[in-house]
Image: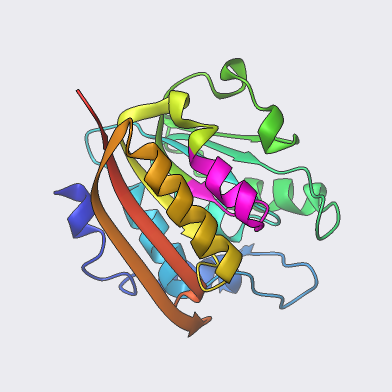
Amino acid sequence: KHYEKCFENPESKLSLVTGLLGNQGNRKFKNHPPGHIMTGEKIQNLINNFCSYENKNIFYLEIGCFTGQTFCSAFYKNKGKYLAIDNFSVYGNVKKLLLSNIEIFRNNDIVEQKISFLEKNCWDVQKNDLGEKIDIYFFDGPHDKESQEKALTFFKDYFSDEIIFIVDDYNTESVSEGTSLGIKNIKKYYNVLDEKIFSKKGYSDYHNGLYVAFLEKKK
């Protein structure tokens, strides 16, 4: 029920997006370079919706966070554990900017909100880096076909019995092809209960495409 409800109005919290990419009181998101947008409004709102469980402290993992435009959207006003992983191997090291944005948008009044960052190659991640099973997994790491396939198979042992899997830049051919292979392989262990593809481009929509799947562990 929670999963389906998240899709009803992905553009319904535009004040949140305005806050993350513009001004919200004394909060201002810092981009690199200034004004550079690497996501879309609906992606931010959708991810925030996914993490907004009322009766569950979720564990959200994001690989490839850069300055935190989607990561901050995930935890903003939500409880749960949030971990971002990036080694800044593509666009330059913006760690200080990322950590600054996290501090700007974390909610200190939500005691159940735990936020952390790990500077590491995602393929070197081990069980003790995670600590618990993943409920929501956003992959925006290497976009080559092999890495996109590996995104599922490498982390499958760390998945909860039910998991929401999200892939950014799905309009890119290597991303969609690799993700399809990963889904094919994961079906040995998980049932794919739902798949959704959003291909609209642009900041007001889904940037460069988005893939979402709801997986349930086979019994």
Left or right relative to 127: residue 187: left
The vertical placement of 219 against 88, above or below, is: above
Q: Can residue 75 be seen in the rendering of this structure?
A: no
Left or right relative to 189: residue 133: right
Residue that protrudes farthest toward the top in the picture:
128
Name which residue lies at 41% across and 40% down: 185
Q: Can residue 121 be seen in the rendering of this structure?
A: yes
The vertical placement of 12 against 116, above or below, is: below
> Does the stretch in magenta take in 145?
yes
Q: In the rendering, at what x and y percent does residue 122 appear?
A: 67, 36
> Does the stretch in magenta take in 153?
no
Q: In the rendering, at what x and y percent does residue 83 appear?
A: 56, 36
Q: Which residues are magenta?
A: 138-152
Residue that protrudes farthest toward the left in the picture:
1
Which one is nearer the viewer's eye here, 174 or 74?
174
Name which residue lies at 38% across and 73% down: 198
Name which residue lies at 46% across and 73% down: 41
Which one is nearer the viewer's eye here, 131 or 142?
142
Locate residue 43: give its quadrant. bottom left
- Quick one: quadrant of the C terminus? top left
The vertical placement of 38 against 113, above or below, is: below
Name which residue lies at 78% across and 67% down: 32
Left or right relative to 127: residue 213: left
Locate residue 66: give its quadrant. bottom right
Q: In the rendering, at what x and y percent does residue 149 appear?
A: 54, 47
